[in-house]
Image: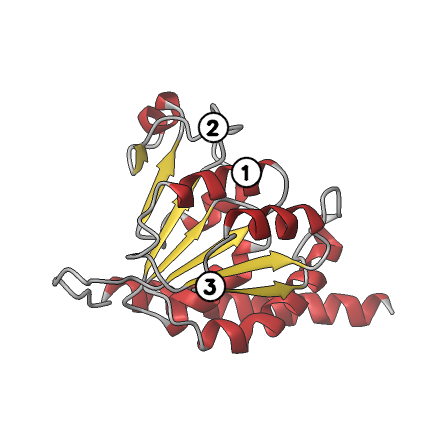
Amino acid sequence: MLSLMINLGIIFTSVICVFIATLIVVRKYRLFDKDKCLKAGTCVVLGSGGHTTEMLKLVSTLDRQKFSPRTYFIASTDDFSIKKLIEFEKGYDDYKVHVIPRAREVGQSYFTSVFTSLRALVWCISPVYQLDADVLLVNGPGTCLPICLLYMLTHPAGKVIYVESICRVKTLSLSCKLLRKFVTQTLVQWEELSEKYPDTKFIGKLV
């Protein structure tokens, strides 16, 4: 059993390495449409609790007529985010929701999260590939990692905006450290972070 788990871990690591190498090439040579578009399909990953509250606060500042249609990804165990989203989108019909397996539960060991992340990655392939989204908004939960990887591979001209959580005051989260070299822009809510990490942008506090 242990041997099988080790082999699966090696396979997963190899897959991730290939993903990363491909991303570096694709994102480096991607092309962007310089013309302003009337609408921008938008994909949003909702984490849970504070992550969801912050993300919906950010989305509320957007022009929903322009940032349409909207697609949300929510973890299957996250009842809080589902309820908050229904309230948030009340009166609108230009959005849809994908409920996906959570890549890593709170408190889950990093070793076992390798396998749950792989499951989430495989599950997300089809819905991410079919996304009609010009922009992907994420703010850090582990759920966003497989979605970001797949989106950047299948939508090389898309923009990925990473908004670091307000609870990250002095250091970036692990998800942000892993993704910030690939995303279009990393936004932080504390000025100390923007000074420590010059490639980030300070936007002030969302909540």
Pointers 2 and 1 in contact (CB under 8 A)? yes
Residue at the extreme top of the image, as rendered: 192
Q: Residue furthest left?
A: 35
The quarter of the rendered structure image containing the N terminus is: bottom right
What residue is shown at x 52% (from left), y 74% (from top)? 127
Could you say where residue 80 lies in the image, as x and y percent from the top left? 67, 46
Horizontal and vertical percent for residue 131?
Answer: 43, 72
Left or right? Give the position of 52 relative to 153.
right
Q: Which three-letter amino acid code belongs to the residue tagged 2?
A: Val
What is the number of the mark on residue 93? 3
Please report the residue visible at 73 percent of the width from the left and 54 percent of the height from the top.
77
Identify the element where label 3 is drawn: loop
Nearer-N-terminus badge (2/3): 3
Label ID, residue 53: 1
Task: Name the residue located 27 percent from the left edge and 67 percent from the top edge.
Answer: 157
Judge by depth and name the residue closer to the eye, 81 or 150. 81
- The amino acid at mark 3 is Asp
